[in-house]
Amino acid sequence: MKENIQVFDNVLQLIGKTPLIKLNSMTSGFNGEFYAKVEGFNPGHSSKDRIALHIIEEAERQGILKPGDTIIETTSGNTGFSIAMVSIIKGYECILAVSSKSSADKIDMLKSMGAKVYVCPAHVSADDPRSYYQVAKRLHEELKGSIYINQYFNQLNIDAHYSSTGPEIWKQTEGEITHLVACSGTGGTISGTAKFLKEQNPNIKVIGVDAFGSVLKKYHETREFDEAEIYPYRIEGLGKNLIPTATDFDLIDKFIKVTDEESAHTAREISKSEGLFVGYTSGAAMQALKQLNEEGEFKKGDKIVVIFPDHGSRYMSKIYSDKWMEKQGFFDSENEATVEAIQY
Ligand code: PMP
């Protein structure tokens, strides 16, 4: 086991082996013991470091990538940051095709990590040649020696968590885990982790967290794609308007939906009560725990692991901004804002 005082050859050696931290005040009075797998401790501040490293190293093993080649993906989020970070250390070019909806901050962040960012119009359909999907596909076809990560449809996304997140949780709980609760976006985290854990103990219950406005829960229940489920929502990285093949729905026992508003408040609550500065989807996962506890899902003696996917610093202009919260109508009264900043 790596210790924090160890010296590392480069930042990539710090990917994974994230801590499992007991939740105390957030779960006081709940049935069972609750532990958070805090993925913000990865050097790129999210669980996506694991898939970026795994997919790129697998391409190297297969001889598809050579130094100087190019790695392409369509994301302005955590995956883009992680790919850019891995590319720097391994000497690859990183191209990210992003939607013009992405904030300037996010684009600047990716550029600071050396990525070349193509900003593509947001309001065109996915099959329009100007869309970020098509731009990424075209660049991949044109650039010899490039790989397209395509995280929603890449089985290696599941493998990354099967070979790291799953074994880590099994070891950290000494095999005593009874429930895994995790957000589902691409589905890589929940599917890969569940696959490993259920191979060790098929009785472990796996619960996926979905957003209102996403099709995943309904698809899990009916195996039908219901467009009526789809409408805009604010949580980023959770839920989807398509069915990703990186999700193995058979490994998930049930889904639970959470609202934008409750998830935002819950993330802020985690920061203030556990001292853990976490992202929006960590709030969503914690909100799911609250609902599941109320439904009587857990009993005394259960050991529940919840995944907190990323760090709060990515959300300063969103859930950690009182102005943003107010603009969304998430504050019922003025007193709900944070402790006042005092000027001298
Ligand atoms: N939370 C955040 C912040 C994410 O970026 C993602 C990835 N889309 C998830 C949760 C969900 O993880 P996964 O894609 O592995 O399902």
Image: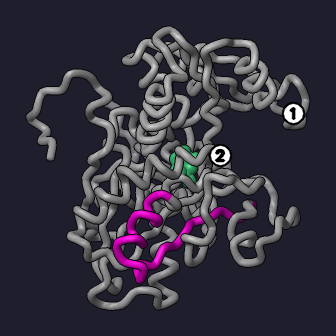
What's under tag 2, amino acid-wise?
A: Tyr
- Please say if 135 is above or below 253: above
- Looking at the rendered structure, the secondary structure element under dot 2 is helix
Q: Mark yes or no: residue 95 visible.
A: yes
Q: Is residue 291 magenta?
A: no
Disc 2 crowd rating (10 Å Cα; few below 14, some 14-19, many 20+) is some
- Please say if 221 is above or below 269: below
Residue 236: give its label: none
What's under tag 1, amino acid-wise?
A: His
Q: Is mark 2 within 8 Å of ligand 1?
A: yes
Residue at 37% in and 48% down? 39
Q: Nearer the viewer, residue 72 or 105?
A: 72
- Please say if 96 is above or below 221: above
- Residue 109 horizontal/vertical position (percent): 51, 22
Q: Quadrant of residue 241?
A: bottom right
The magenta segment is 192-213
Left or right: 19, with 338 as reference point: left
Q: Quadrant of residue 204?
A: bottom left
